[in-house]
Amino acid sequence: MNKIISPPSAQYLRTDAIRGGMDLLMFAHRSHLAHADAALAERGLGRAHHRVLYSLSRKPGGTVKDLLEILGITKQSLGRIMKDLIEKDMVETKTGEHDRRTKLLYLTNKGSSLENELFDELHENMARAYAAAGVKSVEGYWSLMQHLMSPEAHASFLIFNEVSVKN
């Protein structure tokens, strides 16, 4: 890393500091996902496909409704993504045991293999960044990211991570 730039001291609510933070988010996101984007493109897939693969790896056996809630996309958009992933033998549907009308979604071995490949690279990058930044910075990052979420997104994040909310 060349040079770490800090926000203007004691001026973190200034417009230039806010824009700088947004710039950081945009460039970090693009750089962090660059390898995954290239690996997906080789297979005729994109970032939306990756989000589905990632979500199903974290929550296998979810329904279309579950995915729509997690991803915050329309049923039509998800339909196109699912069609691609099913045709490429990366996602399969199984009939629910309790309600045979329910279709449960799972990664196939091929889908799981791709998701693991993508995750390994992303894991290395996050681990490197966490180690370089230190504990306090990682705690600050987690706090900042959660404060950027709407209450609905935060509730979904908690459910996705199986965190119980106590009032």
Image (tube, grey):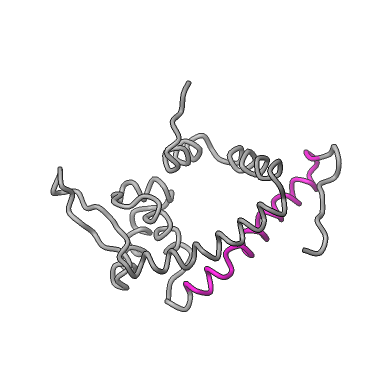
Q: Which residue lies most toward the bottom here?
A: 42
Q: Please state the horizontal and vertical placement of residue 11, each as a whole percent of the image.
A: 84, 39
On the image, which quarter does residue 50 sit in?
A: bottom left
For the point 47% across and 41% down, which residue is it?
Answer: 157
Q: In this view, does 108 lie above or below 63?
A: below
Q: From the viewer's perspective, is 145 left or right of 8?
A: left
Q: Compare residues 29 and 164 and report the one nearer the observer.
A: 164
Residue 121 among those drawn in magenta: no
Residue 137, percent from left and from top? 70, 44
157 relative to 114, above or below: above
Residue 43 location, x and y as percent? 42, 77
User: Which x, y percent locates residue 109?
Assistant: 32, 67
**Residue bounds of the magenta highlight:** 12-40
Q: Does the magenta stretch include residue 22?
A: yes
Residue at the spot 37% in from the left edge and 64% down from the top edge: 112
Total numbered badges shown on the rendered structure: 0
Residue nearest the viewer, comparing 166 with 65? 166
Q: Which residue lies most toward the right here?
A: 9
Secondary structure mainly formed by the magenta segment: helix
* Quadrant into which the N terminus falls: bottom right
Is residue 21 shown above or below 119?
above
Q: Is residue 59 left or right of residue 9?
A: left
Quadrant in the picture for residue 99 = top left
In the image: residue 91, left or right of residue 7: left
Residue drawn at x 18%, y 49% as measured from the top left? 96
